[in-house]
Amino acid sequence: MNEKKEIEKTDKEKIINGEWVNCWICKNIFRRRRETKRYCDECEKAFCEGEHGSFAQKGRGLCIACQMKQKQNP
């Protein structure tokens, strides 16, 4: 049988298509659901603005994990 495996969309793709997505940090670390339409430009994962990410220069969104990586590797 030839079964096509559907490629999982990134959070960024889902948000661009108008879907609400759970913040990956809230979901994976704190086991809670917090829907958002913000995504990180680096990892393309959804984040809740203000708590687990923010917008930097030129409206670029970054989650706190990617912010920490940038500070470690300027």
Image: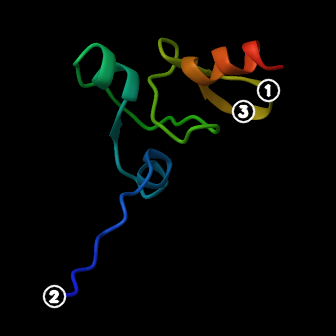
Residue picked out by circle 2: 1
Which amino acid type is shown beneath numbered disc 3?
A: Gly
Label 2 or label 1, whichever comes before in sequence order: 2
Q: In what element is the residue under mark 1?
A: helix
User: Vertically, is 65 above or below 12?
Assistant: above
- Does the CB distance between marks 3 and 1 fall below 8 Å? yes
User: For the image shown, how many numbered marks are present on the structure?
Assistant: 3
Q: In what element is the residue under mark 2?
A: loop
Q: What is the C-alpha distance between the residues marked 3 and 1? A: 6 Å
Residue picked out by circle 3: 59
Residue 58, percent from left and from top:
79, 33
- Does the CB distance between marks 3 and 2 fall below 8 Å? no
The quarter of the picture where residue 24 lies is top left
Q: Which label sits in the foreground, 3 or 2?
A: 2
Which amino acid type is shown beneath numbered disc 1?
A: Gln
Q: What is the C-alpha distance between the residues marked 3 and 2? A: 47 Å
Residue picked out by circle 1: 57
User: Vertically, is 44 above or below 59?
Assistant: below
